[in-house]
Image: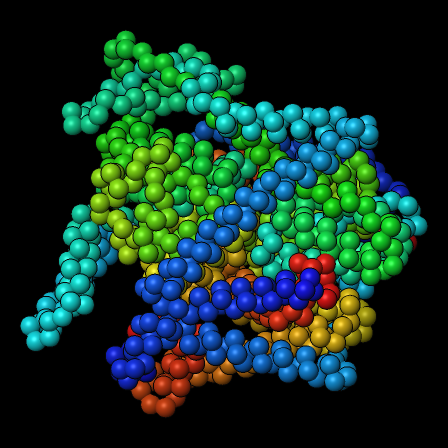
Amino acid sequence: MASGSPNIYGPKQNFWQRHYRPLIYLLTLVCVVGGTLTRLPLSLSVSDATQGVFDTLEKLPELRAQDIEKQQALLAEKLEEAKTNSGPDLQKEIAAIKDKIARLQMNPKGVVLVCIDFDPSTEAELGPMAHAFIRHCFSRGVKVLVNTGGNVMSQPLAQNIISASATEGALMKKNKYDFMEDGTDYVFFGFRPNAFQLYLQMGENILTAYETDYAGHDLTLLPIMRGIRNFSDIDMVFSISGYVGSPETWITVGNTKFGKPVALGQVAISASDYYPYIQSKQICGMLPGLRGAAEYEGACGSPPRATGRMWAQLYTHTFAILLIIIGNLEFFFKGFKRRKV
Amino acid sequence: MRNYLPPIICGVCGVIMMLHFFLPENTMLYKTMMEWVTNSTIVVGVFGLFIGLASLVHNHGNRIARRSPGWGYSVITLSFTAIVALTGIISQNVGPSVVSKPLEKYNYDNRKNQDHTLITHTLFGYKDETYKTNLVAAASTGAPEMKGEEITVRKVPLFMFFYNYVIMPMGATTFSLLAFYMITATYRAMRAKSWEASLLLISSIIILIGQVPIEEIPLIGKWIMGHAQLIVYMSLILYILYAAMKQFFSRNFITCGILSASAALIGVIWYYTPADVDFEAMKSIILNYPNNAAKRGILIGVQLGSLATSIKILSGIEKPYMGGRG
Amino acid sequence: MELFTIKSLPLWLQYVNENWFDLNKLNALIGIIIFGSLIVYFIRRAKSGAYLFVRRIPGLESIEEALGRATEIGRPILYISGIGGESDMQTIAAMNILGNVAEQIAHYDTDLKVPCINPIVMTIEQELVKQAYTRAGRPENYKEDCVYYLSDNQFAYASAVSGIMVREKPAANFLLGNYAAESLIIAEAGASTGAIQIAGTAAISQIPFFIVACDYTLIGEELFAAGAYVSREPLLLGSLKGQDIAKLVIILIMIVAIILGTIVSAFLLKDGFIYGLSDFMNKIFDLKAFK
């Protein structure tokens, strides 16, 4: 706890005690640069939180098939009812269910909404997980809807990520996929203000929330939007956020309100805040920081952008542990010295 | 009127929003209210933007006019506000050029003739070298050799240029300061001054080690990972025995006895801990159990505090929008 | 075991559920009524003059010390109400404290600086500080430029605030409100200038950084209690008490639910009174209790 004095050691100080701050900064820089230059492969075990995200995406075709079955069972029920009691309301309901089944059948592999809600400051941690997740979706034939949260700074980043992921698939060694076309395989809605109300509107009709995509194309003319009207046509939400409050919004809207599986991608600082939601099953999984991104890349065979950065994290953590040990040894020996006097 | 109208508006709007939460979603009333709230928030937000801009210009303009200390920063602030605002308004065709070649497409006959290129940035902007960079990047991912001499030239909007070369690096730089501050804060704060501080110390070391693949560290990495339980339990036991010894020499025999019994209990827990529990498993246990319990406790308290504050504002007991108390 | 389904309800209730009131949220409404009633009850008790004990919060006790120190040294006081918007509860709590702090500052005639990240919060705080100076009887000392807008970008704001701290060297920094990653940058910048720092946030992940870098830290709901604590107004103290009793009710429900759940798991119960009660307790906080 700083008590108004910038140095914890008081008046009598040796070289280390006078200059510990710049020395620590310099050694941290050495660790980070060394880690960046280390180009060796890393194998990481996948945690339960990351596995949850992976498994949910892999199960999307199953979830969609279950949805279609439920709607078909409901349709059969309503048709049975119509035999004895036919009215205009019932006919409307039957038409709506048929329309819903047709929409669900247009995207049998599933539809994912990815909310890219971070700015350049957190791009180092969250960028790789966005890339890995979207590539995983493309490699499984899942349609991807991308929007941004409440901050306009996310839009250019999201644009870069989705267009890179759409074109890089054909160049990958593992999990290749064809070039993804904007408007057919994915759509980027762009930025709109007032995120919470926007998400609620998406529950009713996405076309009232977003009339055009980021480039100004009318959404009603895009092939991908033929099978997607509102949240009930989306199978999963993946919110990658560097901002406070955004994940809670998605948990409230996506999971509590619309009953969809929600996965989160978080910076490591905030990740520990969201473990309670995993336990209560309000989220299906989470990618916690750079480690989560690296685990996910390993699980789905994406190019190792985050995995490469793990070396810097490894060296820095090791340095931090050494510093803690040195600090505590200094603390204990000071105590012994004081008692001797 | 001036004293009554704002609290009435606040109360009525608050109650409407509260009732809105309880409405079924497929009703017309819900949709109408939703649209009204969305549009109102956008309008108020836009006004807020202008107020912010006006305050910025007024504040910095005054500093420049009075030549207050640091007025040079104000000149920079205002000029860049104007420049970046202009780049957002002018045409997207104004900007640096990018020279690129399209990648070979595989069985791609039914797709439109799009320019599928990987644009990467170099240190000094977009250059012809960009294509070479792409070649290298593409080659390393196993793409077939590039064929054809077809070249396309397109403009990158100036706004994106500013975003990629000014805003992105500066944002990343400021955030990366955190790493340095955190390391010094860790060094300053992680001392075993009391038993609570020691618990914090041990759990933070477990999580620091569990978060990274420590076995990759040469010479000692594999040993640390393989002897996780030895390191953690032995440290705990030794620390508790040290504290017990201090109590013994201070003639607090009861405390000494309790501490010794705790050390023995930890030994028993160690005996029954499965062999496959390593730092990663311990990290998961700490994050999933004590961390969740503490977070939930604080969350419940915070949400109740928010509920009480909301009730106070809706009922007019607190009026922050009117300058504090009534 | 499903205790309730929508189809098991009478037709008129099903009609109400479809058109007027989502019955899945009935538990939320009951919760609001109960907790609201508790708060109102204790407000009435406080109004009638009953003594309500509030434990000592060191961070809030030291506000006067910090203000006095700033006045002695002759340096300004920096008040930062976080990066939240005008609808953020933490920002509202920070603004409540600002009103009280500004009133005390007006008495001491010290410089106050309130840089803001949100223009709407800025306008509210301008009014707040002006009213505080008026209440203190020093409206002539209020400077319009003391509350100003910096930038709405998180790190641009943090850089600007760090710059203000290093250049103007305030004697006391109040870091109260909603913070994210910039908390450590701002707190360390303040610590390096030797200012006394009082921080408070309900953002759990930022609390450790404040504890390390600041002299006093208000954790979680201490921030919401601060308005009542500093002003000692009966209405606010009453609501604080009501909030605490509401927390006690939740704790009791949780303890009962844990005991019942443990019995159900231990004895593998599938039906009966205890199983039914345990299931009911689990559904109390579920927003989809009716299927």
Closest to the observer, A107 or A220: A220
Quadrant that contains the C terminus of chain A = bottom right
Q: Quick check: A66 left or right of B135? A: left
Color encoding of the figure: rainbow
Q: Quick check: C8 left or right of C198? A: left
Disc tally is: 0
Measuring from the top left, give residue B42's x and y in whole percent: 49, 48
Closest to the observer, B92 or A278: B92
* Residue B93 visible in the displayed image: yes
Q: Quadrant of residue C279?
A: bottom left
Q: Residue at position x 25%, y 10% from top?
A: B148
Q: Residue at position x 70%, y 84% from top?
A: C45
Judged from this view, the residue extending furthest toward the left is A83
Can you say whether C98 is above or below C161 in the image? below
Q: Quadrant of residue A131?
A: top left
Measuring from the top left, give residue A146's x and y in whole percent: 36, 42
